[in-house]
Amino acid sequence: MALVNHETKDIHCKILYVGPNLSGKTTTMRALYKELAEKTLSHDLFFEDMEAQDKYFEFLPLSLGDVNSYQIKLHLYSRPYWGVYDTLEGLLFQNLDGLVYVFDSDPLALDDNINELSDVRERLDDKGFDASNFPQVFQYNKQDLLRKLPTGLLNLELNTYRYPFFETVATKSVGVKESLTSLAKQILSQIKSE
Ligand SMILES: Nc1nc2c(ncn2[C@@H]2O[C@H](COP(=O)(O)OP(=O)(O)O)[C@@H](O)[C@H]2O)c(=O)[nH]1
Ligand SMILES: [Mg+2]
């Protein structure tokens, strides 16, 4: 549940990037940092940690501007791959407001994508979230590959509840901001309806 602070007029949203190993989560966060945060955030603050990718989670705070005079603050995390401690995993999914699935469009990655999806669904379930009614977006990443699965098929296999999806090339920053914006809209409309 997003934290709305009426005194300071800001809304804090916790967003987790998930996906199989090497699907492009770190690259996506780097691209978002370049597009949205480079001017406002100290480089040192983040990239030292981001270098240690897959050992620790990554964290990137972003500002998405104002809505109805409230500042929207997005706190982005990524789910590490190996050696995930249960306690850390629990913390990452705790108080979560939205999910970005970063899937790899490479045909060879389909099984990994499917496994990650079911693993994440289990985690959501553990935390009492309903996967069919929870802010989320799908990034079908690595669209620049010559051999890739058609988006229709990826949707059929992965996007069971028909959430917004984006064809992305994280290495070229294509589509990553759009998918984050779409997720933020879902989160904000959920806040309004509560
Ligand atoms: N061709 C291609 N490679 C990508 C893309 N996004 C990420 N990669 C590469 O895939 C590898 C894994 O990316 P990374 O962001 O570390 O994956 P993570 O394990 O999900 O954090 C790296 O070599 C990236 O450069 C993309 O859109 N297209
Ligand atoms: Mg990574």
Image (cartoon, grey):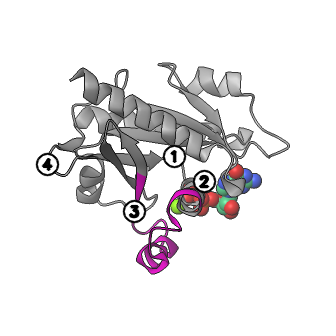
How many angstroms separate mark 4 from mark 2 (CA)?
37 Å
Q: Name the residue that disc number 1 marks.
A: 19
Which image quarter is the C terminus in? Answer: top left
Point out residue 147 in the picture as x, y percentages from the top left corner: 83, 41
Can I make out residue 130 in this image?
A: no
Query: Which corner quadrant of the image does residue 122 belong to?
Result: top left
Q: Secondary structure at mark 4?
A: loop
Name the residue nearer the viewer: 122 or 144: 144
Q: Name the residue that disc number 4 marks.
A: 7
- Please state if 38 lies on the left or on the right of 134 as rendered: right
Q: Secondary structure at mark 1?
A: loop
* Numbered tag placed on residue 64 in the rendering: none
* Mark 1 beta carbon near ligand 1 (under 8 Å): yes
Q: Mark 3 Cα within 10 Å, few/some/many (few <14, many 20+)?
A: many
Give the mark, 2 or 3, whose residue is nearer the N terminus.
2
* Numbered tag placed on residue 57 in the rendering: 3
* Numbered tag placed on residue 24 in the rendering: 2
User: What is the three-letter code of the residue carrying label 1?
Assistant: Gly
User: What is the three-letter code of the residue carrying label 3?
Assistant: Phe
Which residues lie in the magenta part? 35-63
Whether residues under marks 1 and 2 lie with C-beta atoms below 8 angstroms apart, the answer is yes
Give the mark, 1 or 2, whose residue is nearer the N terminus.
1
Give the mark, 3 or 4, whose residue is nearer the N terminus.
4
Q: Mark 4 Cα within 10 Å, few/some/many (few <14, many 20+)?
A: few
Query: Which corner quadrant of the image does residue 123 belong to?
Result: top left
Give the mark, 3 or 1, whose residue is nearer the N terminus.
1
